[in-house]
Image (cartoon, grey):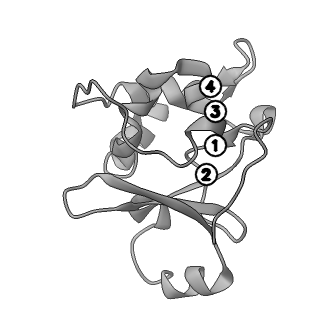
Amino acid sequence: MEVSFNSSKKMCPSYIGKVGAQLFGVMNKDGNVQFITPLTVTEDFLELNKDQNSLEQRFRFTGKCVEKGCAQWNNEESKCSLSQKVQNFNTNQQAELFFCPIRSQCRWFFQDGKEACFSCNEITRNMEELLLNLE
């Protein structure tokens, strides 16, 4: 099922796995995220994956950026603070952007440009380190 996003709404590329969210990436064997055409998360998907590691360590989800309703929102700068933190994980200098099905609506791309994209596929494999840095 292909999803079309409203271009005026920014999407969070680090959303939680819950019913109604959009699955747009899967961790592959080399530890990077393989981005896919977004699929809507269902109860069945959650049930099939409940006894394994955290969903967010194996998959990438997107949903509407809630801005001030999110703990990562920086009110002073009116932007997501997580994007900049994620950029610190860029271990692979790239010249070209990889495929991303949400780039045109992505909060991080909107505010930080292609620099935000270069670390984006590192999110799941570095989740523990990222969470430690957020505390």
Label 2 element class: loop
- Whether residues under marks 1 and 2 lie with C-beta atoms below 8 angstroms apart, the answer is yes
Q: How crowded is mark 4: few (under 14 residues within 10 Å), some or many (20 or more)?
A: some
Three-letter amino acid code of the residue under disc 1: Cys
Pinpoint residue 38: horizontal percent, then vertical percent: 58, 61
C-alpha span from label 2 to label 3:
11 Å
Closer to the chain start, of discs 4 and 1, is: 1
According to the picture, the residue beneath numbered tag 3 turns out to be 107
Q: Nearer the viewer, mark 2 or mark 3?
A: 3
Q: In this view, does 54 lie to the left or right of 126?
A: right
Residues under labels 2 and 4: Cα distance? 16 Å
Given the image, on which type of amino acid does mark 3 rest? Arg
Q: Do the residues labelled 4 and 3 touch (CB within 8 Å)?
A: yes
For the residues labelled 3 and 1, say whether their Cβ atoms are less than 8 Å apart.
yes
Q: Where residue 64 sits in the image (x, y, percent)?
A: 74, 47
Mark 4 and mark 1: span between their CA atoms?
A: 11 Å
- The residue nearer to you, when weighing 101 against 50, is 101
Residue in the image at 40% along x and 26% along y = 87
The reply, left or right, for residue 97 in relation to residue 7 is left
Which residue is label 1 attached to? 12
Amino acid tagged 4? Phe
SS for dot 3: helix
Residue 110: mark: 4
Q: Which of the marked residues, 2 or 4, is nearer the chain's N terminus?
A: 2
